[in-house]
Amino acid sequence: MSHHFLCKQQEIIEGNPRDFSLELESGKFELFLVKHDGIIYAYKNQCPHLGIPLNWQPGEFLSLELTHIQCSTHGALFNLDNGYCILGPCAGESLTSLTVEQRDDELWLQLDSLIPITEKVA
Ligand code: FES
């Protein structure tokens, strides 16, 4: 199982998500980390509505109230803890959740989590 180092755990602060652009063998991959109630969540930086990045500015992923992830293009709102869209043109769909492993104080992206579940089963 291969992993990619992202950052130190303490670099991810509540209310201040961080985006990453990785150059992998399979091509460019964009994701972001967001901390909520002490837990760090990782999502692919891609809105299910049009398949484009959620943010216009680096690290700008949250609604004004910091209660949801918000797409900057059409304003869709997603739950912080599961990526489920509660409001907007893609309501009922979800962000792609990724697996991040903590090793001491370091966060590592599990690269196998980038493969869609249907391909994993095949
Ligand atoms: S592209 Fe995200 S809501 Fe339309």
Image (cartoon, helix red, strand yellow):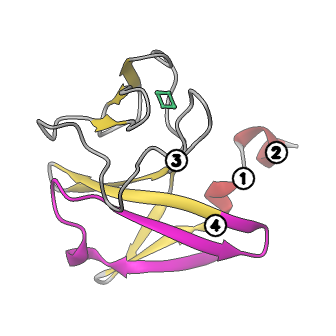
User: Of marks 2 and 3, which one's residue comes earlier in the chain?
Assistant: 3
Q: Quadrant of the C terminus?
A: top right
Rendered image quadrant of residue 66? top left
4 vs 3, front mark: 3
3 vs 1, front mark: 3
Question: What percent of the width, then of the height, locates residue 116?
Answer: 72, 45
Q: Residues within 10 Å of mark 4 (few under 14, many from 20)?
A: some
Disc 1 to disc 4, how far (Cα)?
8 Å
**Residue type, mark 2 in image:** Glu
Quickly name the residue at label 4: 111
Disc 2 to disc 1, how far (Cα)?
7 Å
Disc 2 to disc 3, how far (Cα)?
23 Å
**Residue type, mark 3 in image:** Pro
Q: Magenta span covers which residues?
A: 1-28
Quickly name the residue at label 2: 119
2 vs 3, front mark: 3
Quickly name the residue at label 1: 115
Rendered image quadrant of residue 51? top right
The disc label shown at residue 53, or none: 3
